[in-house]
Image: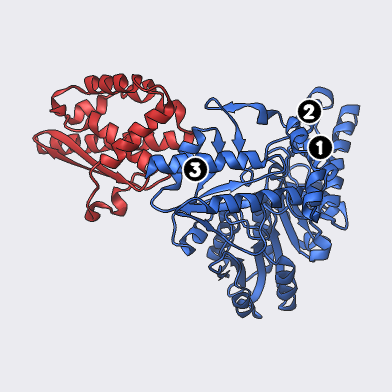
């Protein structure tokens, strides 16, 4: 037995599936095959129960109440912050800011740190495989401040051109914002190396971890990332909760993002002082219930272990890659050496949308289109792909269903 | 000649055709076939301004008026969408602007298409209908100005 196989044996997929109520349902009269995990993962019973339990047992507004419910809700909310801190190995819980999601986390950095620190002519580097959420905030900043956006090109097999990255780095480079794992291709980028080289050039680095946090072990201190952003809902947690990790000294120096309650120390019409970290960045009543339930998702992932999850997902990736290659006219987009369990593909003379509609008719959920990464699609000269992304609860049998479904669907379309 | 039938009658025809199919696979086979048979648009019509906004795939739609009747032609790089628009053309083409603007197009619901397509794709279908009605309105306004 190989190491991977023995690890995989540690995951009892069929028992795990029982923990996800939604996986029991049918779509269009067929058992659901859910392969849209890179868009959002399904939620285990533990997470759903945590949400219900919060509203049933201790719903209250947090941080200022002196009654018991407020204390319990505050304790639960802050317990998630501690769980997140451990999940990404941040040095302190003050470095964990809750947001609405990765998009808001990135925007927060663009609106506060970057707006304060950058001036006309300064350069920001992103990569050619960014999600729109890691492109548009920087374009908006450039339009406002006169900063300049530079783009790391993507190679034919879907990796970052690191030589080109080095050539882009200069004294003008002040910020690098790069995705750790491509949502459209599954490519794992060498962010540790990018951070090291960017730091050597004097630039700060934000890592977009929206796709990586569910698959890879995240250690922001080992990475030496200045900022790290990810979302709960792609890590088996509720929607509407995101995380921004920031190094304490950076967060301290940053102006607040939004003004309001929760983020202040003292308010008067003569002047207002802001709350300590991380509350300075959490104006208004936060998404308490989903944040509380997010801890159940982190516990769930920790209880299985990322290594075991990865071994299982890598097995699915290898199996699916092999099986899909047997389909005539099918071409996998993104053949990076290091990938997570995401497969994007195109089929000759067939539009991804047609594949998506007809697979849906067979109960198979995939994503079709540009995956909010239009520049990357332009790079490959395509308008979109069909993407299947696998999670810990997926099985080889489901991949068989995808492959036979695809064969039928392509026959119908050609 | 299809133009002789009323819009409602053509809608009814389509509903009856679809009632013959047992499964959605059969319905899709039929729609795909319609898509394949729809005459492609010439390259000169495939311009930015002829693109229907709101569709996930690229849909081109053009319209012309002859003797007070509106005729549509369309194309898409996605075949199911092309089949759907082929049905819309069959129903609406060859009618007056008023008839087109007043068309209820209940057949889309009756054949189950609205429920069967994911929301984003239904929106694309609705975007096509809206664009066809917009063309009808534009011809009506133009005629009123002339008259």
Q: Give me the C-alpha separation between circle 1 and circle 3.
A: 36 Å
Disc 1 crowd, CA 10 A, few/some/many (<14, 14-19, 20+): many
Residue A47 in the image: above or below residue A207: above
Residue B118, how many percent across, how many down?
48, 33
Name the residue tied to disc 3: A406
When asked about the image quadrant of residue B28, the answer is top left
Q: Quadrant of residue A396?
A: top right
Q: Of the residues tagged 1 and 3, which is closer to the observer?
A: 3
Q: Secondary structure at mark 3?
A: helix
**Secondary structure type for disc 2:** helix
Label 3 Cα neighbours within 10 Å, binned few <14 / some 14-19 / many ≥20: many
Q: Which chain wears blue?
A: A
Residue highlighted by disc 2: A49
Q: Residue at x 53, y 58 (%)?
A: A333
Is A69 or A409 nearer to us in this picture? A409
Chain ID of residue with mark 2: A
Say whether disc 2 or disc 1 marks the residue closer to the N-terminus.
2
Residue occupying the far front of the picture: A1
Whether discs 2 and 1 lie on one chain: the answer is yes
In the picture, the disc for residue A149 is none
Q: Are marks 2 and 3 on the same chain?
A: yes
Q: Is residue A275 visible?
A: no
Residue identified by numbered label 1: A296
N-terminal label among 2 and 3: 2
Check contact, mark 2 vs mark 1: CB within 8 A. yes
């Amino acid at each position: 037995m190989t190491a991977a196989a023995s690890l995989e044996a540690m995951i009892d997929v069929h028992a795990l599936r029982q923990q996800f109520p939604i996986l029991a349902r049918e779509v269009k009269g067929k058992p659901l095959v859910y392969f849209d995990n890179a868009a959002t993962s399904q939620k285990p019973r533990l997470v759903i129960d945590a949400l219900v339990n919060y509203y049933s047992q201790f719903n209250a507004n947090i941080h200022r109440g002196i009654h018991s419910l407020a204390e319990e809700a505050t304790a639960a909310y802050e317990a998630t912050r501690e769980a997140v801190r451990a999940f990404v190995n941040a040095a302190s819980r003050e470095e964990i800011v809750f947001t609405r999601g990765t998009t808001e986390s990135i925007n927060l950095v663009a609106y506060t740190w970057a707006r304060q620190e950058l001036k006309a002519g300064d350069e920001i580097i992103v990569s050619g495989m960014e999600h729109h959420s890691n492109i548009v905030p920087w374009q908006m900043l450039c339009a406002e401040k006169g900063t300049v956006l530079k783009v790391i090109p993507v190679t034919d097999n879907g990796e970052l051109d690191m030589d080109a990255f080095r050539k882009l780095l200069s004294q003008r480079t002040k910020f690098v914002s790069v995705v750790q794992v491509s949502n459209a291709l599954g490519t794992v980028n060498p962010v540790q190396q990018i951070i090291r080289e960017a730091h050597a050039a004097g630039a700060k680095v934000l890592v977009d971890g929206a796709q990586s946090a569910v698959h890879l072990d995240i250690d922001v201190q080992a990475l030496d990332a200045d900022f790290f952003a990810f979302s709960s809902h792609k890590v088996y947690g509720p929607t509407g909760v995101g995380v921004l990790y920031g190094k304490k000294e950076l967060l301290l120096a940053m102006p607040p993002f939004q003004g309001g309650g929760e983020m202040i120390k003292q308010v008067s019409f003569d002047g207002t002082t802001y709350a300590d970290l991380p509350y300075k960045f959490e104006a208004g009543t936060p998404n308490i219930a989903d944040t509380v339930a997010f801890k159940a998702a982190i516990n769930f992932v920790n209880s299985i272990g990322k290594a075991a999850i990865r071994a299982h997902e890598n097995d699915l990736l290898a199996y699916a890659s092999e099986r899909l290659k047997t389909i005539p006219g099918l071409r996998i987009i993104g053949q990076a050496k290091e990938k997570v369990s995401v497969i994007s593909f195109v089929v000759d003379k067939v539009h991804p949308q047609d594949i998506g509609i007809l697979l849906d008719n067979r109960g198979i959920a995939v994503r079709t289109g540009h995956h909010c990464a239009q520049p990357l699609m332009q790079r490959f000269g395509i308008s979109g792909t069909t993407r299947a992304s696998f999670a810990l609860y997926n099985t080889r049998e489901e991949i068989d269903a995808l492959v036979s479904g695809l064969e039928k669907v392509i026959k119908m379309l050609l | 000649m299809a133009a002789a039938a009323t819009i409602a009658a053509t809608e009814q025809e389509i509903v009856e055709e679809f009632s013959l199919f047992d499964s959605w696979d059969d319905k899709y086979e039929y729609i795909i076939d319609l898509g394949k048979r729809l005459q492609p648009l010439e390259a000169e019509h495939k311009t930015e301004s002829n693109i229907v906004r709101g569709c996930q795939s690229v849909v081109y739609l053009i319209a012309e008026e002859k003797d007070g009747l509106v005729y549509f032609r369309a194309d898409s790089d996605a075949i199911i969408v092309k089949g759907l628009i082929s049905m819309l053309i069959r129903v609406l083409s060859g009618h007056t602007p008023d008839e087109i603007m007043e068309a209820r197009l209940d057949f889309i619901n009756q054949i189950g298409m609205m429920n069967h397509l994911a929301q984003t794709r239904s929106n694309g279908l609705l975007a096509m209908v809206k664009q066809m009605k917009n063309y009808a309105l534009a011809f009506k306004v133009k005629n009123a100005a002339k008259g």
